[in-house]
Amino acid sequence: MDKTTLLRLPQVEQSCGLKKSTIYAQIKEGTFPRPVKLGARSVAWRSNEVDEWIQARPRTQ
């Protein structure tokens, strides 16, 4: 069983190669995983959901 960790925004940006504004635009469009609330002003993403999103991207040649 894979252990799911929570990723903060800098880790998500590094993993997927997108910047904050693009990530939040895609969340609004429903094409990027939504974060989970950790507190009043903090969020994180489930690593397995981000990994699945990355794997679903088409490969370029």
Image (cartoon, grey):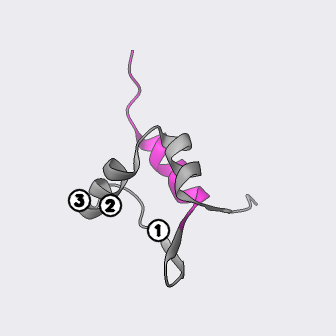
* Image quadrant in which you'd find residue 5: bottom right
Disc 2 residue type (three-letter): Ile
Q: Residue at x 26, y 63 (%)?
A: 28
| Real-space Cα separation, disc 1 to disc 3, in angstroms | 14 Å
What residue is shown with label 3?
29
Which segment did they paint magenta?
44-61
**Label located before the other in sequence (1 or 2):** 2
Magenta stretch encompasses residue 46? yes
- Relative image position of residue 51 (x, y in whole percent): 55, 49
SS class, disc 3: helix
- Is the Cβ of the residue at disc 1 closer than 8 Å to that at disc 2? yes
What residue is shown with label 2?
27
- Is the Cβ of the residue at disc 3 closer than 8 Å to that at disc 2? yes
Disc 3 residue type (three-letter): Glu
SS class, disc 1: loop
* Image quadrant in which you'd find residue 61: top left
Residue closer to the observer: 31 or 21: 21
**Residue 54 vertical placement versus 21 (above, below):** above
- Relative image position of residue 50 (x, y in whole percent): 51, 53
What residue is shown with label 1?
35
Q: Residue at x 41, y 41 (%)?
A: 18
Q: Residue at x 52, y 58 (%)?
A: 49
Count all numbered tags in the image, as a single digit: 3
